[in-house]
Amino acid sequence: MATLALPVAGQFIGGAIGGPIGATIGRALGALAGSVVDQALFAEKPQRAPGVDIRISGSAEGGAVPRLYGWNRLAGNIIWATELEEIAGEDSGAKGTAPEAEERQVVASFAVGLCEGEVHRLGRVWADGQVLETEGMTIRFYRGTETQQADSLMEARQGSDAAPAYRGLCYLVFERLPLGQFGNRIPNITVELCRVVGELEPMIRSVTVIPGATEFGYDPVPRVRVTGRGAVGRENAHASALVSDWTLSIDELADLCPNLDHVSLVVAWFGDDLRCGECSIRPKVEAASRTIKGTSWSVAGLTRATAQVVSSHGGGPAYGGTPSDAAVRAVIADLKARGLEVTIYPMLLMDIPAGNPMGQPAYPWRGRIAPVGGGAAAQVAEFVGSAGGWGYRRFVRHYARLADEAGADSLVIGSEMIGMTTARGTGGFPFVDALVTLAAEARALAPSVELTYAADWSEYHGYQPPDAPGDKWFHLDPLWASDDIAMVGIDNYMPIADWRDGEDGPDAGSDGPYGLAHLEAGIDGGEGFDWYYASASDRLAGARSPISDGAHGEHWVWRFKDIAGWWGNAHHDRVGGVRAASPTAWVPGMKPIWFTELGCGAVDKGANQPNMFPDAKSAEDGRPHFSTGAPDALMQRQFLRAHLNHW
């Protein structure tokens, strides 16, 4: 099933609601032409007591106007209505039907006041508890700005001088809503709304879009899957049969983040072995047999019939399939039409199920792919492969061509391949050399597309060998300095806190786990900058060891969080405790830095270890240090606010 997981930052529970969704507003209007307005709806009612369910429609004068924070579903008050109308229904076209037998429809025009403005997003609309398919209906949404004008229907009915604009009030106008399916009465209308509060959403300029593994989840066109003779099911339009998941999601993102100008689009292929010399890399599908009306799956010359199928887990596919090339092209065109820059972010996922014959961990992180034993250079060459084989070279070249054809602005040629980039051969680091070559090939295929590599936060700055922790190799510098690489990419999941429950932890006395001052201070301070934990037992005890460079005073060399120090200085390898006389190819400040990923899980103490995420099927499943694992959306929000404030 194609689904979208779009970690929009700032979608949090807000507003005070009480009780379940009520039944419909009874006896709303008379059933047929000539009926009078039902007194139960339009007669004056006493002031409602606090705590009443705000998701039941009413029309009481003097009622409270709700104030909305974040997302909520509410109904509000009917603030304006016309007389019911009876109109002729559509001609059925049947021969011999007398005009007087033609079906008649009862329609209503009315406005529902919802909450205090300014509201940023209108979501779904329900009528009598069922999602209302609004295609073809005349519904107007007023966000509650202080400059909004009176509704055109109200002006036409009441005159331009008598129609109120309801400035500061968010409301909906329904014009000639057919009432037949609701028993010829106004249904109970409830509406999903979001009012952005706080500073985070306006600060967000770019977003990395996931899941990346979804055959048609990125397709702007709503698709249906043929499930049998005359039977179909939804493929990529689960919230509305008429709007694709992609369109609904990106519309919502644009509404909530008005300054968004860049989207990074993840597209996944799959590796099948952690031994790099044995690992093939290819696109896969969710099922070998599936018919999607109006389109078909195809990636890099493979069709559904010729592609491999992802492994199974829990009775279904362990991953979604690789996004179809046609869907990727279409979504890039959609993003460009919205005025957004686009990065294509090819990502390698490891499709290695539990109980695999290699005895490897289930669904591991791609950073664990590495050569085994000797002969690293030969194994790397097998992994990279030729342009026509199912290796890493074909993966990169395919998306370089697609980026060029579709008009993408930038391309990531790899991400978090730390086991590969740190593998040493007799002449250095063979996979880094291969990335330099692949960058040149990608540049030739897509000359106007900017290129980067998305290094893991623990990888970008250099390599300290486990067998010689006093050494430091700036192993990625040949890639960072390459003329074909436009920027340094970092997937930034660095820890910025060390919070524990209780009052005697090492961070006790700060402004608390959500305090912006405390979190921001940890971005270029704390663990990985001022100090480190030499062991797991030291972490448990809070025993911190200082980070310093006594030999040369280049403290930044050992501080993975000192991005400014790394960026602004020449790099001299340290081998055997000796500082190389000549610097690497890196010239201080020569390339801009992009955070190709940034964030933390919405989990208790997420800032302690932002790179930890729950995934029950994977050996990488985990929670941050000292975390209970409880959901905590505020932690995620404050983490992002701290970073965006800082940078």
Image (tube, grey):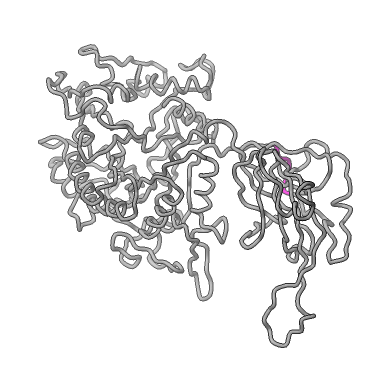
User: Majority secondary structure of the magenta segment?
Assistant: loop
Image quadrant in which you'd find residue 531: top left
Q: Is residue 33 above or below residue 311?
A: below
Magenta includes 17? yes
Instruction: Look at the image and tell me whether residue 311 can be seen.
Output: no
Task: Tell which of 237 and 260 is nearer to you.
Answer: 260
Q: Residue at x 21, y 21 (%)?
A: 470
With 263 as the anchor, is 435 left or right in this view?
Answer: left
With 390 as the anchor, is 222 left or right in this view?
Answer: right
Image quadrant in which you'd find residue 261: top left
Q: Position of residue 354 (x, y in %)?
A: 36, 49
With 290 as the anchor, is 441 left or right in this view?
Answer: left
Q: Is residue 463 above or below residue 210?
A: above
Task: Tell which of 524 and 506 is nearer to you.
Answer: 524
Magenta residues?
16-21
Magenta includes 244? no
Q: Residue at x 17, y 44 (%)?
A: 437
Task: Tell which of 99 and 534 is nearer to you.
Answer: 99
With 342 as the anchor, is 590 left or right in this view?
Answer: left
Instruction: Look at the image and tell me whether residue 25 can be seen.
Output: yes
Task: Tell which of 241 and 143 is nearer to you.
Answer: 143
Q: Position of residue 577 (x, y in %)?
A: 16, 18
